[in-house]
Amino acid sequence: MDSRSLPHRSCRNEAQRTDGLENKFRVNPYLLKIDRVRNRGDGRAFDSGCIEVIKRPFKVFILKRFFKNISAAKLIEKEVVKLNFEPGKNDLFSFQQSKDLRAFDPNSCFYMIRQVFDQKVRHIFNNLFKVNLDGSLSIAVSKYVDTDHLLCHDDKFSDRHIAFIYYVNRNWKAENGGVFEMLDHDKFGRPAGKVHSISPQFNTLLCFEVSRYSYHKVSEVVADMSKGRYAISGWFHSSAAKDLSKHILDKKNVPSTDELPYCAPLMYSEVHDLSIFRLSPDHYLATADEIVRRFKDDGVVMFDNFLESDFFHDICEELKSDRIKWIRLGPPDIRNVESAKLKTQIGSSGAVPGALALSALLDVFQTTTAISFFRNFINFDYNGVINVQVEIEVNRWRRGCYTLAQYSGIVESYDRSFELVMFFNTKYLKQRFDAGCGGFLHNVSDGNHEEYIKPTDNALIIINRPFGKNPYIKYLNHRLKKATFHSIRFRYYIKIINEIGDAEDLFLEETSD
């Protein structure tokens, strides 16, 4: 035989290695015959224990002993720790992720795993969900370490159709977190309470059909930093999912009266007493040009020690007292925070009975006196007639609280918006309180630059609110322990009525019968 017809030894070795990987990563043959599982009514499939079905709040299939050879699952567990991961953090999540498995060397086990998903798993899902997954496959390895989490969401984006998670770790304990939690939905289609939890199980594949009700999250990991919860996860895409997305309702526009912050038209006031400020208004106005420049460039400006010290101390004590009734605000795909129950009308009678200093602050900041002062710094030079609404929240922050950037308040139609934020009782936070604990105020400017603002006592923060970009409080993780602090947020929505009038006609006067 002509030696030139024989493959090179290295080529033969590569071919043998590829064949070996293909044989190793064989899917449990039982799972290739699971199309009958869909219609079973008992929640479990057959007697083998290979398949489990969770029916509420949405259907999830758990495919156990996914790879036939346990050595394949052990190899994955061994290899994932060697990967390079890119850290990812935003308002919704904190975890690390590898590049897409498509980009791996064709001789690597991860590329082979992708081939298995693209062919065998695609076939399984087509049968299991009775769909035609004619789109692409997105698949990567995720790594969750201490404090990492993924907050409530529905996975609905573009043409995502089937979501999946393959769990890599052996002996992962539920108390370490990283648990897949399924949430129900209310009558408006918004996420509600947790219904079911699924702990990571070695060599197990979890999958579900993405829909407007597939609300879920991954609980915070509480483990030594040397431990990581690894999973291979992603989505199968399809053209059918694109059609489905056209019928998704906008759940965020459905209000719930027990979750709305206090919002009212700005009160017209001829009172110009701002004695609660530590420094006189003239002190700030003397540097107004510099403040306007900073606000225009950064979208945020901060005044330290803003309130008179005794007045600020009184508010701190009132916020810690039992005079305030706290309620939970949601829904969890937008925020999870405790808010003070305010009276429907803020005024001389007091927004919070028994909390005189707090009520006085809320009264002043929802008057024309206040906005006439702050408009000197927000680059809003307009001498027409405008209408202003102010949304007020008094919040208590503790472990597990957060707001997401998509929350934009309840006023939809406006021409300009800005926000005032003040923090209270932050001195009780531990000395090492930093961005790693969460709780920082994140502001995204027009240029997509994100600034982290540490909660600081008695500092007034003025934030510009461009359309579609909203400041948020990052999820507070277990490092905060039992500490609690407070904030007051004023969101001002300005609507231009017409372009006539002098400066003194800036506001529509509010009158009462």
Image (cartoon, rainbow, N blue to C red):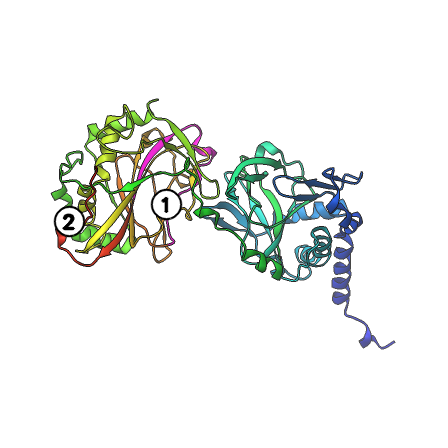
Q: Residue 498 appears in which quarter of the rendering?
A: bottom left
Label count reads: 2
Q: What is the crowding at mark 2: few (fewer than 14 residues within 10 Å), some, or many (at least 20)?
A: few
Question: Furthest-right residue in view?
Answer: 1
Q: Range of the magenta residues?
A: 468-491
358 left or right of 98? left
Under circle 2, the secondary element is loop
430 left or right of 28? left
Q: Do the CB atoms of the residues marked 1 and 2 lie less than 8 Å apart?
A: no
Q: Tell which of 484 and 208 is nearer to you.
A: 208
Question: At 14% from the left edge and 47% from the top edge, which residue is drawn?
Answer: 285
Question: At 31% from the left edge and 52% from the top edge, which residue is drawn?
Answer: 414
- Which quadrant does the N terminus fall into? bottom right
Give above or below for 503 relative to 220.
below
Whether 472 is among the magenta residues is yes
> Where residue 389 sits in the image (x, y, percent)?
28, 45
* Whether residue 226 can be seen here: no
Residue behind mark 2: 287
> Which numbered marker is on residue 409?
1
> Where residue 247 sits in the image (x, y, percent)?
54, 55
> Which numbered marker is on residue 131?
none
Under circle 1, the secondary element is loop
> Where residue 248 sits in the image (x, y, percent)?
53, 53
Q: Residue 319 appears in which quarter of the rendering?
A: top left
